[in-house]
Amino acid sequence: MSAPGPKNWSMRAATPADKQAVLSLINLIQPHIPWSSQHYDWQFLQGPAGPAEVRIIEADDRVVSLYVGTRKNLWVDGTVVPGIMVQDVLTHPEYRGRGFLNGMAAAFLAEMRDWGDYGYTFPNKLSENSFRRTGWTELMRIPALQLALSGTGGKATTHGGLSEIASFDSSVDAIWRNAELRIGALRDAPYLNWRYGRPQTVYRRFLIDNDRGFVVLKLYDRGDSKVMHVCDLVLRADARQLCTEVLTEICAIAIGAGAGLLTAWLPAGHPYRSQFQAAGLLPDLSNDRFAFTTGPEHALGSLATSSSWHITQGDSDVY
């Protein structure tokens, strides 16, 4: 398919034969976060909403640009709609500045509109302005929330209603459906087990009072210190008062794991945001992203309301 932008180039859907070339491009650009064949399959092929839409540009007999929309079942005001999260937007360093990114962004957005899909993304700083230029609606700034931790360490025990589990079963589906969170990726068991089944990554999963909520944590070693990410925290609407107690327990777990910092994402206006702030998780304005959304014209008013969204660190493929 031809895309607007520079002349004499085109964008096409990737095929299985392109897998190694795509992996080579990803690992060239982000050698600090290398992808394996297993990671590629998990990210692009195994999602519960269907395989990702993977687009590439070839030049000089090699893949030089990548644009990916991973398919999501998106929950919008109690209805499940087809969604796409744009991510893995990459261009070979030798081919930057030629308009590939903007051209691919415009062409892919046109495809999404043809399909009638809802979309969201929170790109890195290099890609951010492309979404502004190509017709996405800027949703919000998302600064990381963080809390410096202190403690003696040692082995943490779970209390306060948290019980650690190995995986999610179908009983978790009712938690999301009764959370009264208006917009977000549908957090049912298939999604949670896929999302937190990322290869070579360790997540800790907890239920809150058996069926009143769930938490997913990830410990990250950044060399000089350890960081605990709150990848996901969802409570049934009638259990929101437990949020402060749950955050206190998360702090204990993080300290027991040797973490010196606790981080999270929650949009301003989110129903848990005040409790996160009361627990000491405050915005780090030096570490932020901007989120963007798109969708059918009739839905944009709802989609563009930032406080309606449940967006957490687990929504990013980085964490």
Image: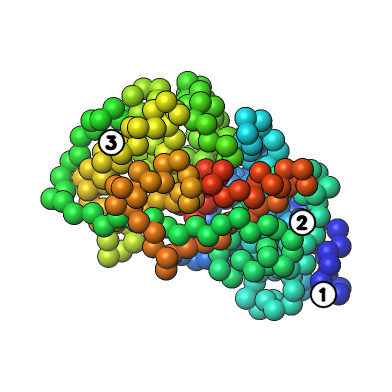
Secondary element at image label 3:
helix
- Residue at 44% x, 51% y: name it: 265
Counting residues from the start of the chain, the first of labels 3 and 2 encountered is 2
Q: Judging from the image, what secondary structure is the residue with disc 1 in?
A: loop
Q: Which residue is mark 3?
A: 245
Q: Position of residue 97 (x, y in %)?
A: 69, 79
Residue 64 position by quadrant: bottom right
Foreground label between 3 and 2: 3
- Residue at left offset 64%, top offset 69%: 129
What amino acid type is highlighted by mark number 3? Answer: Glu
On residue 108, which mark appears? 2
Q: Which residue is mark 1?
A: 6
Kindly identify the residue that appears in the image at 72 percent across and 43 percent down. Answer: 299
Q: Mark 2 packing: few (<14 Cα in 10 Å), some, or many (20+)? A: many
Q: Nearer the N terminus, badge 1 or badge 2? A: 1
Residue 71 visible to an observer of this rendering: no
Looking at the image, which residue is at 13% across and 50% down?
A: 152
